[in-house]
Image (tube, rainbow, N blue to C red):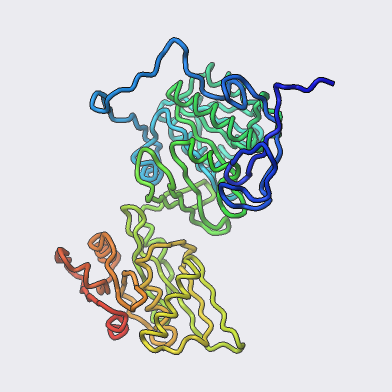
């Protein structure tokens, strides 16, 4: 039997998309073990794996290098999505011709968010095509009835064949397309199953051509792995223009939309939403929302200020320190880095001579917030000290600052914005690094207490 030379067997890494002609135990690229999967792909003379799925330059056009000074830079055309929080994360609005990847846990509200965006855009006169490979038309309609009223500018399509989706886009010529989800799309030119590395990569490449060729904004929904990253090869995130992660506990009321890649704006912005019966509602003031119901005059509780892009957010830090009944003390951190909490406890024991090495310690950021900014260090330290000494901290006091291994309190950025946010919510005292006092203007109604070391901060509380 003659061997088919048009097909070849290739091994892909499920984590990063690394390609190899031979099987490998450990991926040479991302160093992950047992992630190689065997797939049969088509070979062609253009060097692509999936035939027409690869971008091929037109032969009648020659690419000529152009001096950067001669390139005319125009402002990108942005559309209002009808949601201020989403506009903030996207950098000011939806850019025409952009490819946006939205990832998140199952049931977190990705489809609900995009359907609300489709409703707002269609109400503004834009033609929107919503392509679903997971739900029927009746299921989508049930969700739509819960979210509000829709007009004829929103078109629904239940299809998993990529060529049929492309044909519908060329026929309808929508301004916005939603693909829910990329793992269900199937390219007939690729012999592997939907959701495989080859299918996801080649399907995204085709959608990228559609977005750029027709100047259509395309949203694609991506499933996530147990580690919380978008399933499929990491090259998927490199191909798109924007990567958004929808975070939060599916059983909690709030959701956070975070940008981790954005070619048209900042990658540090977040949008906060609250899940209700009629869909997602924007939270204009996340600090006030996060601080609702916090205890009064309780030890181990302090409010610290973190920055998410240009937005200051006040978060309550709760700590519980108690003597252990076992030989090995237990440590637990929720919402912050566990290793960072262990490091700060070691600094307390070494620099302030607090005997907490034989104590159980639990640190929690109330409301389910996840913050990794070093400016939360001072708040974590003060909460641990308050719980260990069983002395409450003033309810009108807030703090921020990075703590070093020598016990010094180091400066952080955008100090004035943090202080003004605290003043707006009624806080009267702010503990901050002494280095942040340089060039800081006077803010009425707020007492600023600069500290240089942890000993100074402990004396204040």
- Up-down: is 178 above or below 55? below
In the depicted structure, whether residue 384 falls above or below residue 316 = below
On the image, which quarter does residue 402 sit in?
bottom left
Viewer-proximal residue among 431 and 445: 431
**Is 108 positioned to the left or the right of 74 in the image?**
right
On screen, residue 59 above or below 123: above
Q: Report the side of 372 relative to 428 (left or right).
A: right
**Residue 330 in the image: x percent, y percent?**
57, 80
- Quarter of the C terminus within the rendering: bottom left
User: Whole-percent x and y of residue 8?
Assistant: 70, 28
Q: Where is residue 125 in the image (x, y as percent from the top left)?
A: 41, 26
Is residue 368 toward the left or the right of residue 418 in the image?
right
Q: In this view of the protein, can residue 139 be seen by the observer?
A: no
- Residue 158: in sight, yes or no? yes
Identify which residue is drawn at 48% across, 65% down: 335
Q: Residue furthest right?
A: 1
Q: In this orientation, which residue lies closer to the viewer: 208 or 252? A: 208
Quadrant (top left, top right, bottom left, bottom right) of the N terminus: top right
For image coordinates 22% across by 76% down, the residue present is: 449
Query: Residue 119 at x, y = what percent?
Result: 48, 34
Q: Which residue lies furthest to the top in this view?
A: 60
All told, the count of numbered labels is 0
User: Residue at horizontal 34%, vertical 73%?
Assistant: 404
Closer-to-camera residue (298/196): 196
Residue at position x 36%, y 84% in the image: 351
């Amino acid at each position: 039997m003659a061997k088919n030379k048009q097909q070849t067997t290739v091994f892909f890494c499920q984590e990063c998309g690394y390609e190899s002609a031979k099987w490998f135990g450990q991926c040479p690229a991302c160093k992950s073990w047992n992630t190689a999967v065997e797939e049969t792909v088509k070979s062609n003379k253009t060097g692509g794996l999936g035939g027409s799925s690869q971008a091929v330059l037109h032969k009648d056009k020659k690419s000529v290098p152009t001096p950067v000074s001669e390139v005319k830079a125009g402002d990108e055309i942005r559309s209002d999505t009808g949601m201020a929080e989403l506009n903030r994360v996207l950098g000011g609005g939806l850019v025409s011709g952009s490819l946006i990847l939205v990832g998140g846990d199952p049931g977190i509200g990705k489809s609900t968010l995009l359907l609300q965006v489709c409703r707002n855009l269609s109400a503004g006169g834009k033609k929107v095509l919503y392509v679903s490979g997971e739900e029927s038309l009746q299921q989508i309609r049930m969700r739509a009835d819960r979210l509000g009223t829709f007009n004829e500018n929103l078109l629904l399509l239940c299809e998993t064949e990529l060529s049929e989706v492309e044909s519908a886009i060329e026929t309808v010529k929508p301004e916005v397309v939603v693909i829910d989800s990329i793992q269900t799309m199937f390219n007939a030119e690729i012999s592997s199953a939907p959701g495989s590395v080859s299918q996801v990569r080649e399907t995204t490449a085709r959608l990228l051509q559609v977005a750029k060729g027709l100047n259509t904004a395309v949203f694609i929904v991506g499933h996530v792995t147990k580690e919380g990253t978008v399933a499929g090869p990491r090259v998927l995130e490199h191909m798109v223009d924007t990567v958004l992660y929808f975070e939060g506990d599916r059983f909690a009321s709030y959701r956070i939309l975070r940008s981790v890649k954005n070619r048209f704006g900042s990658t540090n912005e977040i949008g906060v939403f609250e899940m209700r019966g009629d869909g997602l509602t924007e939270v204009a003031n996340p600090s006030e929302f996060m601080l609702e119901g916090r205890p009064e005059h309780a030890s181990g509780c302090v409010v610290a200020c973190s920055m998410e892009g240009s937005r200051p957010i006040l978060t309550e830090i709760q700590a519980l320190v108690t003597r252990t009944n076992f030989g090995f003390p237990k440590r637990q951190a929720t919402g912050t880095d566990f290793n960072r909490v262990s490091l700060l406890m070691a600094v307390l024991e070494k620099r302030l001579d607090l005997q907490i090495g034989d104590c159980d310690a639990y640190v929690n950021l109330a409301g389910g917030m996840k913050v990794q900014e070093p400016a939360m260090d001072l708040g974590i330290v003060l909460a641990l000290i308050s719980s260990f000494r069983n002395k409450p901290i003033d309810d009108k006091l807030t703090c921020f600052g990075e703590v070093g291994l020598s016990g010094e309190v180091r400066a952080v950025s955008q100090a004035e914005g943090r202080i003004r946010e605290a003043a707006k919510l009624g806080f009267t005292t702010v503990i901050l690094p002494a280095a942040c006092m340089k060039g800081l203007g006077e803010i009425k109604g707020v007492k600023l207490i600069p500290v240089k070391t942890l000993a100074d901060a402990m004396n204040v509380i």
